[in-house]
Image: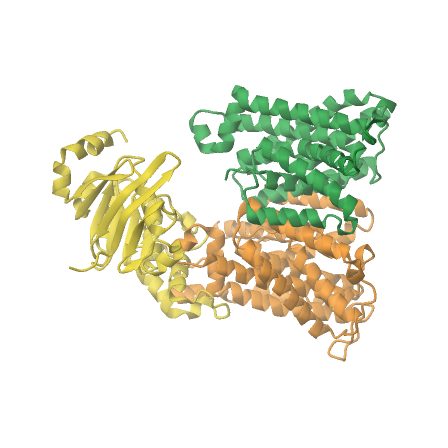
C-alpha cells in the first residue's frame, strides 16, 4: 500500500456563516485521474484554493506525499510538486508562450536570480520550455504575445505553465472552461496524454468528458463531499442524478 | 520587444538571442550622444543634466516599466544620493568616483531596507506608501538643517578633478563626459539585467502578479532585489547632479521631482529601456526652452503633456513610434 | 479656568473638520471605483477661488458664496468625469495617477496665471472674526461655525447613506461593484453623482479653508497629501472612518506644530507610514 499523492483530512473553511468547505477528506492515489464535480457554488474552486494554499483552512490538514504542507505558502507547495491551473486565464499577456514557460522553468531550476547572463544562454531551460510547448501543441505559436493567441490556445498555455513546475500533483480548474465543445475534446486529449506518474484532479461540468477521462469521481455539494466512486457508480447513483445531473441542463 | 517578427527564427535560443541583440539604431543613438561636444559646446551643462535625468528615469523604469511597481517617491533615493555626495564633499573628500560609489551604496541600503515593506503591497497602498516615504524623507532633510542646510540648500561642495586629471570646467565639458560615461555603464548593466532570467521574472511580475506564486516564483524577493538596484541607480544620478553642479537643494527630494520623473518616463515610454532616455531629452530641452520665459507656467505644459500621453499615447512616444513602424511594415 | 491644551484640541478639531470636508468625497469615490483621483484638491482649490472672486470682487456675502463654491466644484468635476476620467476606470493605477497629476499641474498653473501665486486675502464680515470667551479661553467664532457645518454635513451624509435608496446603492457599489451591477444598479451613474457630491464638498472645504490655512496655487498639492492620509488611515468608503481619521490628524498636526515645532510635518508622515504598514486597508477599512 503506497502513500497517496495528495491527502486532505477534515478540511474546513467558512466565510462568516457561509460554509464553503465542510470536513473534506480526499485521497488521490499516485497517477490517479480524478474528477471533481458539483453544482455551481458547491465549493470546487475553493477546495483547490485550500489545497494550493491560496486560502487558509479553518481546520484540517493537507499532505503532499509524506509531507504535511498545511502551513506552507503557495510557492513552497508548488516547489514541492503541487501545481494548479486557473478557471479564468491567469497568464502573462505581454509575454510570448516561450518566454512565459521559460520563466516558469527558470524559477523551478533556481536560476531566476541570475541577472548577468542573457536568457538565451540558458539552453537547457529554453529547450525544456519548448519541449513542453510542443507536447501541448503550442510550438507553432510560441513566438506570439500571449494576448494575441486564440482562446483555446491560451487554455493549453495554462496547463503548460503548470507543467513547467514539474508537478507530482496537478489540479486543473475547468481546463476547458469557455472553450466550444468541439475544441474541448482536444484539451482533454492533451490532459489524458500526460505522464502516468502525474496525479490529476480536474473540475469539469461536461459529464461526457468526465465519464470519458476520469477514473474516479468526487461529487461536492454545499461545501461537503456528497459521494464519490467510479464513473459507473456515480452515473447509477440516484442522489447524484437529482442534485447534479438534473440541474446541469439549466447551467 | 515582443513586436519583433520572429517567424523565421530557426530555434528558440536564436529567437531569444535575437531579441537582445544590439540594433543599429541603438548604436546610432549612443553615437549621437557624443554630438553635443562638437555641435553645441555651450549647452554641455544642459547635456550633462539630461544624462543625469536619463539615468534617474532609467532607474524608475526598472521598477515601474519592468516590474510594474508604481512609485510616487522615487526622488527619495535621488535625494539621498545627492546629499550623500554633497556632504562627503563638504566635509573634505571631494573625490568624485568614490563619492559616487558611497552615494549609490547608501541609497541602495535605504532602498533595500524599505523594499521589505514595498514588496508586501500593491495598488493604492503601495502608491500611498511610496508617497509617504518620499514626504517623510523630504521633511527629515528639512528639519535636519544642521546637516543638509535646510531650505537654503547644501553649500560648500567642492568636487576634485576627475581621476586627478580633468577639472570640472565652467562649460560642463568634464561634467557631460563624466555623466554620460556613468549613464552608459549603468545602461549596459540595466540592459543585461532585463535580458537575463531575472529580467524575465520581473516582466512576469508586471504581467501577472497573481500567477507568479503559482509557478513557484518568489515575487517578493525579486521585487526586493530590483528595488534595491533601482534605488542605488537613482542615488548615483543624485550624486552626479550634486558633484557636477556643486549644490544640493531640498527640491531633489520633493514630490514634484518624483512627478517630473514619472512624466519623463511615461512620455518616452515605460518598459522600453530607451523610454526614460528619450523622455529625459525631450523634457529637459523643453524645460530649458519654456521655463526661461515663464517658469511658473512650465507645469501647465507638463500637465497638458501628461493628459495627452495618457489619453492619446498610452505607450509613450517610443510605443507610438513602434506602432506606426509595425503598421507601416504590414502595408 | 481651562488649561491651554483645550485651545489646542479645539483648533485641532476645527482643522480636522476641514480635512474631513476635503477628503470625504475622495474616500467614497475611491471605495466605489478604485479610481485614484489625485486631482481631488484641485476641485477644492476651485471652490476657494470662486469664493474669493465672489466675496472680494463682487461683494457677495460669505455665506451666499459657499453654495456657489460647492456647485462650481461639483459641476467642474462632472465635466472632467464625463470627458477624461470615464475612459480610465479600467485602466492601470499608473494611468490614473498620471492623468490626475496632469490635471493638478494644469490647475496649479492656471490658478497662478489668473490669481498670481500670492496668498488670497478673504474679507470676512466682522461678526465672523470675533471670538467667544468661555472659562478663560477664546474660541474663534469662525472655527465654531466650521465645526457646526462639518457636523451637520456628516449627519446629513450618514443619514443619506443609511436611509435612502441612493445611499443603499452606493453602499452596495462600495461593497462589491460587480455584484451591484449584477443586481441592476447603474453603478456608473451612481458613481458620477457621488463623484460630483464629493468634489462639491471638497469645493466647500476649499472655500472654508481660506480663513484657516490661506489659499494659493500650491493648495492643490499641499492638501492632497492630507487628503490621502485621511483616506488611507480612515479606510476606503467609510464616512465614519474618514471623520475619525480627519479629527485625529487635525488634532495631532496642530498639537505637533504647537508642542514640537522643530519636527514640522515629519511626525504626521511617520504616523501615516506606520499606520499604512500596520493596516494597509486603514484603521476602519473593511478590506
Residue C2 pos. (x, y %): 79, 34
Q: Which hue is chain C drawn in? A: green
Question: Which quadrant is home to the N terminus of chain C?
Answer: top right
Relative to B309, residue C61 above or below: above
| Shade representing chain A | yellow
Residue A248 as seen in the image, left or right of residue B44: left
Figure quadrant of residue B41: bottom right
Residue in front for this viewpoint, B74 or C230: C230
Report the side of B47 relative to A17 (left or right): right
Which is more toward the observer, B323 or A79?
A79
Is there any visible trace of residue A190 in the rendered image?
no
Going by the picture, which residue comes out furthest to the bottom? B164
Q: Colour of chain B?
A: orange
Return the x and y of residue A98 as percentages of the image width and height. 39, 59
Does residue C248 appear in this view? yes
x 33%, y 37%: residue: A19
Residue at horizontal 59 percent and vertical 35 percent from the top: C241
Location of residue C44 (image quadrant)? top right
Residue C124 in the image: above or below residue B273: above
Residue nearest the viewer, comparing B91 with A206: B91
Residue pictured at 66% horizontal, 43% vertical? C101
In this rendering, is residue A146 above or below B88? above
Position of B125 compared to B157: left or right?
left
Amino acid at each position: 500500500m503506497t502513500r497517496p499523492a495528495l491527502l486532505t483530512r477534515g478540511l474546513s473553511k467558512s466565510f462568516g456563516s457561509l460554509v464553503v468547505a465542510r470536513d473534506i477528506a480526499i485521497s488521490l492515489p499516485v497517477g490517479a485521474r480524478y474528477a471533481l464535480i458539483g453544482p455551481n457554488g458547491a465549493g470546487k474552486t475553493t477546495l483547490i484554493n485550500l489545497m494550493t494554499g491560496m486560502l487558509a483552512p479553518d481546520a484540517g490538514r493537507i499532505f503532499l506525499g509524506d509531507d504535511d504542507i498545511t502551513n506552507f505558502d503557495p510557492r513552497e507547495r508548488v516547489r514541492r510538486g503541487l501545481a494548479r491551473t486557473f478557471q479564468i486565464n491567469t497568464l502573462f499577456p505581454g509575454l510570448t508562450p516561450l518566454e512565459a514557460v521559460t520563466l516558469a522553468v527558470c524559477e523551478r531550476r533556481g536560476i531566476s536570480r541570475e541577472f548577468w547572463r542573457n536568457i538565451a544562454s540558458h539552453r537547457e531551460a529554453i529547450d525544456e520550455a519548448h519541449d513542453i510547448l510542443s507536447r501541448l501543441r503550442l510550438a507553432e505559436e510560441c513566438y506570439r504575445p500571449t494576448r494575441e493567441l486564440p482562446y483555446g490556445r491560451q487554455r493549453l498555455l495554462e496547463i503548460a505553465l503548470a507543467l513547467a513546475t514539474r508537478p507530482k500533483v496537478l489540479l486543473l480548474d475547468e481546463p476547458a472552461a469557455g472553450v466550444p465543445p468541439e475544441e474541448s475534446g482536444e484539451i482533454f486529449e492533451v490532459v489524458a496524454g500526460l505522464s502516468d506518474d502525474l496525479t490529476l484532479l480536474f473540475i469539469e461540468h461536461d459529464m461526457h468528458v468526465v465519464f470519458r477521462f476520469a477514473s474516479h469521481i468526487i461529487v461536492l455539494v454545499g461545501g461537503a463531499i456528497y459521494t464519490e466512486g467510479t464513473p459507473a457508480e456515480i452515473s447509477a447513483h440516484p442522489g447524484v442524478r437529482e442534485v447534479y445531473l438534473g440541474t446541469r441542463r439549466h447551467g | 520587444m515582443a513586436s519583433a517578427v520572429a517567424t523565421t527564427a530557426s530555434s528558440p535560443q536564436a529567437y531569444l538571442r535575437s531579441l537582445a541583440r544590439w540594433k543599429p539604431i541603438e548604436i546610432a543613438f549612443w553615437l549621437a550622444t557624443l554630438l553635443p561636444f562638437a555641435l553645441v559646446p555651450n549647452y554641455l551643462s544642459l547635456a550633462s543634466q539630461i544624462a543625469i535625468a536619463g539615468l534617474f528615469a532609467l532607474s524608475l523604469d526598472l521598477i515601474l516599466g519592468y516590474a510594474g511597481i508604481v512609485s510616487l517617491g522615487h526622488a527619495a533615493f535621488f535625494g539621498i544620493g545627492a546629499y550623500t555626495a554633497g556632504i562627503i564633499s563638504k566635509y573634505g573628500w571631494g573625490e568624485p568616483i568614490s563619492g559616487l560609489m558611497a552615494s549609490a551604496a547608501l541609497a541602495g541600503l535605504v532602498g533595500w531596507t524599505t523594499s521589505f515593506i514595498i514588496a508586501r503591497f500593491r495598488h493604492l497602498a503601495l502608491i500611498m506608501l511610496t508617497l509617504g516615504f518620499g514626504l517623510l524623507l523630504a521633511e527629515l532633510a528639512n528639519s535636519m538643517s544642521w546637516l543638509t542646510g535646510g531650505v537654503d540648500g547644501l553649500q560648500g561642495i567642492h568636487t576634485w578633478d576627475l581621476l586627478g586629471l580633468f577639472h570640472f570646467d565652467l562649460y560642463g565639458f568634464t561634467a557631460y563626459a563624466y555623466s554620460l560615461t556613468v549613464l552608459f555603464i549603468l545602461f549596459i548593466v540595466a540592459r543585461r539585467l532585463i535580458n537575463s532570467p531575472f529580467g524575465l521574472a520581473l516582466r512576469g511580475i508586471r504581467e501577472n502578479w497573481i500567477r507568479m506564486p503559482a509557478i513557484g516564483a518568489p515575487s517578493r524577493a525579486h521585487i526586493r532585489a530590483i528595488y534595491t538596484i533601482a534605488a542605488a541607480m537613482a542615488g548615483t544620478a543624485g550624486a552626479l547632479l550634486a558633484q557636477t553642479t556643486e549644490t544640493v537643494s531640498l527640491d531633489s527630494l520633493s514630490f514634484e521631482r518624483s512627478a517630473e520623473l514619472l512624466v519623463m518616463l511615461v512620455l518616452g515610454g515605460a518598459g522600453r529601456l530607451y523610454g526614460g532616455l528619450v523622455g529625459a531629452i525631450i523634457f529637459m530641452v523643453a524645460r530649458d526652452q519654456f521655463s526661461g520665459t515663464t517658469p511658473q507656467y512650465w507645469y501647465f505644459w507638463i500637465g497638458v503633456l501628461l493628459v495627452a500621453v495618457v489619453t492619446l499615447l498610452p505607450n509613450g512616444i517610443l510605443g507610438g513610434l513602434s506602432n506606426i513602424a509595425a503598421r507601416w511594415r504590414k502595408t | 479656568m481651562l488649561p491651554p491644551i483645550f485651545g489646542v484640541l479645539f483648533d485641532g478639531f476645527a482643522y480636522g473638520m476641514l480635512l474631513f470636508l476635503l477628503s470625504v468625497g475622495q474616500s467614497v469615490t475611491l471605495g466605489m471605483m478604485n479610481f485614484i483621483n489625485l486631482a481631488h484638491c484641485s476641485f477644492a482649490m476651485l471652490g476657494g477661488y470662486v469664493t474669493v472672486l465672489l466675496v472680494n470682487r463682487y461683494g457677495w456675502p460669505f455665506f451666499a458664496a459657499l453654495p456657489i463654491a460647492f456647485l462650481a466644484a461639483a459641476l467642474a468635476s462632472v465635466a472632467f468625469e464625463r470627458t477624461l476620467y470615464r475612459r480610465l476606470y479600467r485602466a492601470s493605477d499608473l494611468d490614473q495617477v498620471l492623468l490626475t497629476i496632469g490635471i493638478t499641474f494644469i490647475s496649479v498653473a492656471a490658478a497662478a496665471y489668473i490669481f498670481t501665486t500670492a496668498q488670497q486675502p478673504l474679507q470676512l464680515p466682522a461678526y465672523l472674526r470675533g471670538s467667544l470667551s468661555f472659562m478663560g479661553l477664546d474660541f474663534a467664532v469662525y472655527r465654531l461655525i466650521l465645526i457646526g457645518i462639518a457636523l451637520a454635513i456628516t449627519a446629513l451624509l450618514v443619514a443619506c447613506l443609511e436611509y435612502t435608496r441612493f445611499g443603499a446603492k452606493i453602499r452596495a457599489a462600495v461593497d462589491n461593484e460587480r455584484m451591484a451591477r449584477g443586481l441592476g444598479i447603474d453603478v456608473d451613474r451612481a458613481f458620477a453623482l457621488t463623484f460630483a457630491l464629493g468634489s462639491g464638498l471638497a469645493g466647500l472645504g476649499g472655500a472654508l479653508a481660506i480663513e484657516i490655512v490661506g489659499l494659493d496655487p500650491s493648495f492643490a498639492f499641499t492638501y492632497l497629501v492630507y487628503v490621502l492620509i485621511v483616506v488611507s488611515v480612515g479606510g476606503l468608503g467609510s464616512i465614519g472612518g474618514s471623520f475619525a481619521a480627519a479629527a485625529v490628524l487635525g488634532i495631532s498636526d496642530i498639537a505637533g506644530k504647537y508642542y514640537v515645532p522643530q519636527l514640522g510635518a515629519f511626525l504626521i508622515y511617520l504616523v501615516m507610514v506606520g499606520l499604512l504598514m500596520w493596516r494597509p486597508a486603514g484603521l476602519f477599512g473593511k478590506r
